[in-house]
């Protein structure tokens, strides 16, 4: 089990003084850290059609980038190239374990675990990210330079590479296995591999107001909500036909504000929207599905494991009714299910003990199944949770 070690300060201090404020190096953040996936396994994932990957390299001094899937890497030589694979936590249970040490940040902010393999001299060039990232150094060594926030010109070094001008570093450091570099949004940075190396980047990203409002509009349309029109009986005579006056503008604003003030509507939208996965999940649909009795028997023997990348959330506004949101869908199990719903969303491993108050007491009476048992059976058969071999 990976455990985050902060030698110089506490998590509270980190959140108060570094999170989204300034970068910092966490020396020995993971003691005895070893690669969670091999370079060959990473290269194999980049051969898959449904996994997002990139190759970044320089040819005759010019930056180049290609998107996967890739069939071969032999033409790239021994230097100056990097393979990047997104959302590896969706496909590797070992890589998914890297998320738990950062559970002091809520999972709705989690983006993914991106892994890069680099040959000596490899990197992606100086750039600025719009998300928080913990870059965990695996095998090998990599030199990182981080500049300060400010007005940095960005330009397209290639159609798929947005770079920034040279910057004065405020951090210039060589990362060794187990070291972690935290970089908030907006700080230019550049990493160059000193030897064959791997980096494991745990990224956290929030949504823009534009994305949230766009998602809300889609949610209202899909659920046929927000259809009421403005009603204004006994309105006064309008003096200027082309004018939207202060009174009418106030009605328009109030119509929209009423939706934003509906906490239950916003909770259901937020839970559904934020629980949708950005990248494809590694869903292994069972060829021989469980029935509810079989599922209960197995759960009594061993816990269920959540697949990597599955997003499961609850909100304070609706959890009292036993509501949770899983992969974009809303589920309601009733007030008695509150604790079970919290366990379902908070825990990567789900035991019978954490759910027993809402499940039959033995498999012989599983025919009297609860709504939760029915849902668990569907989820396991669909591949969202699984029983380890």
Image (cartoon, rainbow, N blue to C red):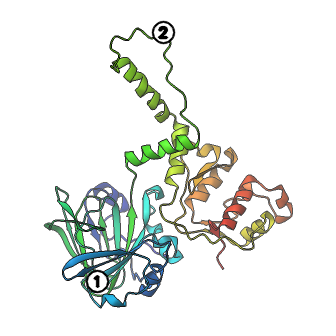
Query: Label 2 vs label 1: CA separation?
Result: 75 Å
Crowding at label 1, few (<14), some or many (≥20) Cα neighbours within 10 Å? many
Residue 18 sits in quarter:
bottom left
Counting the numbered discs, the total is: 2
Is residue 316 visible in the rendered structure shown here? no
| Location of residue 326 with respect to 250 vertically, above or below | below
Q: Is residue 127 above or below residue 335?
A: below
Is the residue 199 above or below the residue 340 in the image?
Answer: below
Q: Nearer the viewer, residue 375 or 33?
A: 375
Seen at 29% across and 62% down, the residue is 129
Residue under the point 40% across and 8% down: 237
Q: Is residue 330 left or right of residue 55?
A: right
Q: Position of residue 245 (x, y in %)?
A: 34, 18
Q: Residue at x 53, y 59 (%)?
A: 311
On screen, residue 160 versus residue 95, left or right, reads left
| 34 or 217: nearer the viewer | 217
Q: Residue 54, located in which quarter of the rendered image?
A: bottom left
**Outermost residue toward the right?**
364
Identify the image quadrant of the C terminus: bottom right
**Tag 2 residue:** 234
Residue 385, quarter of the rendered image: bottom right
Mark 2 vs 1: CB contact within 8 A: no
Q: Is residue 356 visible?
A: yes
Please name the residue shown 19% across and 83% down the image: 60
Residue tagged by mark 1? 141
Q: Secondary structure at mark 1?
A: loop
Measured as percent of width and height from the top left, residue 250 is found at: 39, 22
């Amino acid at each position: 089990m990976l455990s985050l070690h902060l030698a110089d300060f506490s998590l509270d201090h980190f959140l108060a003084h570094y999170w989204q404020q300034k970068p910092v190096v966490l020396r020995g953040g993971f003691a005895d850290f070893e690669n969670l996936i091999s370079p060959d396994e990473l290269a194999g994932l980049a051969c898959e059609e449904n996994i997002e990957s990139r190759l970044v390299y320089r040819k005759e001094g010019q930056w180049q980038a290609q998107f996967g899937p890739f069939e071969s890497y032999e033409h790239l030589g021994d230097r100056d190239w990097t393979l990047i694979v997104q959302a590896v936590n969706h496909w590797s249970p070992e890589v998914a374990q890297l998320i738990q040490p950062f559970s002091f940040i809520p999972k709705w902010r989690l983006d993914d675990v991106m892994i890069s393999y680099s040959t000596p001299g490899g990197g992606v060039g100086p750039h600025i990210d719009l998300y928080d990232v913990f870059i965990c150094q695996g095998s090998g060594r990599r030199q990182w330079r981080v500049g300060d926030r400010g007005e940095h010109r960005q330009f397209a070094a290639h159609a798929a590479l947005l770079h920034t001008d040279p910057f004065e570093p405020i951090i210039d450091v060589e990362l060794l296995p187990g070291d972690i570099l935290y970089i908030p949004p907006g700080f230019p940075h550049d990493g160059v591999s000193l030897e064959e190396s791997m980096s494991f980047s745990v990224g956290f990203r929030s949504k823009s107001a534009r994305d949230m409002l766009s998602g809300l509009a889609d949610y209202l349309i899909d659920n046929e909500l927000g259809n009421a029109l403005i009603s204004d009986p006994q309105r006064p005579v309008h003096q200027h036909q082309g004018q939207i006056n202060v009174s009418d503008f106030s009605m328009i604003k109030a119509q929209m504000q009423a939706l934003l003030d509906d906490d239950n509507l916003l909770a259901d939208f937020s839970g559904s929207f934020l629980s949708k996965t950005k990248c494809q999940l590694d869903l292994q649909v069972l060829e021989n599905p469980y029935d509810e009795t079989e599922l209960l028997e197995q759960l009594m023997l061993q816990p269920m494991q959540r697949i990597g990348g599955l997003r499961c959330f609850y909100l304070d506004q609706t959890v009292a009714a036993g509501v949770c949101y899983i992969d974009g869908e809303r589920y309601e199990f009733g007030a008695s299910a509150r604790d079970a719903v919290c366990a379902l969303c908070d825990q990567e491993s789900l035991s019978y003990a954490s759910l027993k108050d809402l499940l039959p007491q033995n498999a012989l009476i599983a025919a009297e199944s609860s709504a939760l048992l029915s849902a668990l059976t569907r989820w396991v058969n669909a591949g969202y949770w699984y029983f380890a071999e």
